[in-house]
Image: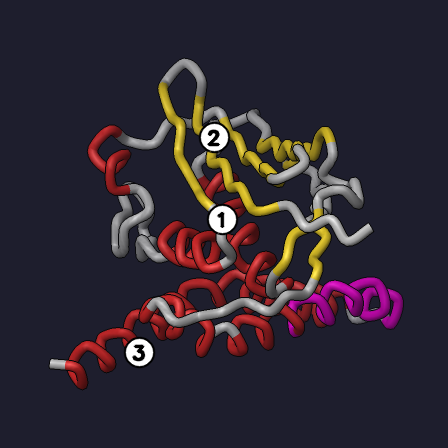
Amino acid sequence: AGRKQEEQFREDVERIIHHDIKGPLATLFSLTQMVLEEGESDALMNAFPQVMVGIQQVIQLIDAAEPLREMEKGVFTPAKTPVELQFKVTISIQAEADCFSESARVFGEAFLFEDMFMNLGKNAIEALPKGGDVTITCRTDPDTVYIAIHNAGAVPESIRNRFFEKYVTEGKRFGTGLGTYSARLIAEAHGGHIELATSEPDGTTITTSFPHCDIR
């Protein structure tokens, strides 16, 4: 039974990594295709920083395989490394409040936090009604850092109670139901919490909270 469970852990983590790695690989492909089509050295130099970021994301996702396996087993212990939670703003995201403040600092593995918020942000953008925004808000108190990601779309009622469970998805052609599950694993492994609030009039807000790290 133990060996069978171990094999299931491995397969589940592989599915999570395969799911998460598609985003940065698709971006890398689009950037290289653009450079080839334009055929200019300036285009290559302009795309180079984004290519570097994409390569780094792929490497980090591969590195996340073993930590995610340990999270599935409940034996993962994150490093006591201070991580400042900051968000890069794109055209479809509005970051507000203390998202760029040094006060939004937690302990843990930076690349795992990046993977978690990449997944949550991607989900929010995919569920966004036409013309809407994804808003990231951050706030801190002496004990806790809160990060809320909001979009105007509502989660279908049929999956609201199981939103963070494994393989739960609806309405996504290539969805695996692993993005929110891995986000829950990462949040809880870092001593945090993740919750969903959703309704037709108010949209969807996913709030993560983590113990505040104050090393000053």
Q: Is residue 164 left or right of residue 7?
A: right
Identify the residue at the far bottom of this view. 3
Q: Do the residues labelled 2 and 3 touch (CB within 8 Å)?
A: no
Point 68% across, 65% down: residue = 81
Residue in the foreground of this view, choosing between 35 and 104: 104
Distance CA(mark 2)–CA(mark 3): 31 Å
Q: In this view, does 129 lie above or below 176?
A: above
Instruction: Please indicate, yes or no, whether residue 18 appears anywhere in the rendered image.
Output: no
Residue type, mark 3 in image = Arg
Residue type, mark 2 in image = Thr
Residue pointed to by mark 2: 205
Distance CA(mark 1)–CA(mark 2): 16 Å
Q: Quadrant of the N terminus?
A: bottom left
User: Which mark is nearer the camera, 3 or 1?
Assistant: 1
Residue 149 x/y as whole percent:
54, 35
Q: In this view, does 55 lie to the left or right of 193?
A: right
Element on which disc 2 rests:
strand
Instruction: Please indicate, yes or no, whether residue 10 appears anywhere in the rendered image.
Output: yes
Q: Which mark is residue 192?
A: 1
Point 44% across, 70% down: residue = 76
Element on which disc 1 rests:
loop
Q: Which span of residues is magenta-colored?
A: 41-55
Q: Tag 1: Cα neighbours inside 10 Å, few (<14), some, or many (≥20)? A: some
Residue pointed to by mark 3: 10
Element on which disc 3 rests:
helix
Going from the N terminus, do you reach mark 3 or mark 1 first? 3
Point 58% across, 57% down: residue = 113
Q: Is residue 173 above or below residue 97?
A: below
Prevailing secondary structure class for the magenta stretch in the rendered image: helix
Going from the N terminus, do you reach mark 1 or mark 2 first? 1
- When asked about the image quadrant of residue 56, the answer is bottom right
Q: Is residue 59 left or right of residue 173?
A: right
